[in-house]
Each structure stands twice: as structure tokens, then as C-alpha cells.
Amino acid sequence: MSTSSRDAEFTDFVAARQVHLRRIAYAVCGDWNRADDLLQTALTKLYVAWPRLHRDGREEAYTRQIIVRADIDDRRRPWRNREQVGLEGHDRAARTGLPPEERSALFDALQALPEMQRKVVVLRHWLGLSVAETAAELRIAEGTVKSHSSRGVERLQQVLAQH
């Protein structure tokens, strides 16, 4: 595979799937800025592994897995809790209204879930992965996936019923 055809195929994949993958990253972490960072990390790693993955057709699964694992890695870093914005209170938002995707009651309800329940619900019910695939991506037992899924869906129903 030549470098130009590799770059063209990668660019086509990113152009077609970037919005979808960004929404997945947001659903996993709950913050659009962190979602952008997670997506950038995932796409960088995907580019490196592109020839191998593209040949097997596993590009999107690999990217989802990197998004989930990068989020887990970020949350485990001890200095993450000490990070603070330098201009706290002085940096005003550029726009007054949020786009519809950010106002979605479903996304708000997802963010009310505990972290692992949120990840399981996104992978199982939004992306349609099987219990086994979800367990493999999150590196947890299938029974744990089932219990997180059940509790997460129940909680989502409660929260959405209140809206």
C-alpha cells in the first residue's frame, strides 16, 4: 500500500466516521473538550495501525476501544484531579445557546449514570455491541456487563421519566 493511498483511505474513513466517533467519546466521558482529546488520541493510534486494521476491516472497533481505554487511563492519572483552568471565571463562553446535540435529555441522563454503567450502556445499547464484545472492550466479566447494563437502563428510565 502506497503512502498516498493509505492517507486517502484513512482520510475517507475519518471524514465519514468522525462525527459518530466524537459522539461516542462524549457519551463515554461526558465532556465535549475531553471527547475531542479522546478522539484525537484514538485517531492518532488508528493512523499508526491503519494498514493492519484496514485490511481486516476492524477500524471502527479499534477506534472505539482506544476511546474507552484512553478515558480510563486519563481518569487514573493522579494529577488529573489537580488540573485547573487558569482563567477561572474570566473566560466567557463564545455562544449563548447550545446546539441540540448538547441539550439532549438522553445525554444528560447518561451523564447521571456512574462511569462504568454509562460505558456499558453506550457500548451495548447505543452501539449495539454484544455482551461478550462489551466485556472484551471494557476488560470486565460478562456478568458484570449484564448487571451494569440492567442497572444503567433502569436508572436512565427513571431519570428520563422525570423530564
Image (tube, helix red, strand yellow):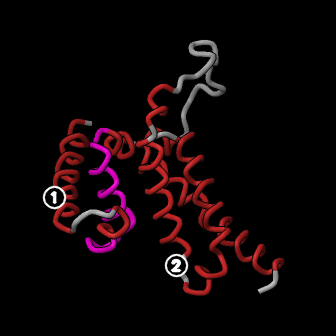
- Position of the N terminus by quadrant: bottom right
Give the residue type at disc 2: Arg
Q: At x 61% / y 67%, what residue is drawn?
A: 46
Give the residue type at disc 1: Ser
Q: Quadrant of residue 6?
A: bottom right
Q: At x 65% / y 75%, what residue is drawn?
A: 50
Q: Residues within 10 Å of mark 2 (few under 14, many from 20)?
A: few
Q: Left or right of 142: which side holds 126?
A: right
- Position of the C terminus by quadrant: top left
The kind of secondary structure the magenta stretch mainly shows is: helix
- Rendered position, 159 above or below 87: below
Q: Residues within 10 Å of mark 1 (few under 14, many from 20)?
A: few
Q: Which numbered circle lies on residue 58?
A: 2
Does the magenta segment cover residue 33?
no
**Could you tell which of marks 1 and 2 lies nearer the N-terminus?**
2
- Rendered position, 85 above or below 105: above
Residue 61 on image: x %, y %: 48, 71
Residues in magenta, as a range: 112-133
Q: Which numbered circle lies on residue 147?
A: 1
Q: Secondary structure at mark 1?
A: helix
Q: At x 62% / y 61%, what residue is drawn?
A: 43
Q: Secondary structure at mark 2?
A: loop
Q: Quadrant of residue 86?
A: top right
Residue 15 on image: x %, y %: 68, 65
Front residue of this view, candidates 86 and 95: 86
- Rendered position, 119 above or below 1: above
Measured Cα–Cα span from mark 1 to mark 2: 27 Å
Q: Which numbered circle lies on residue 79?
A: none
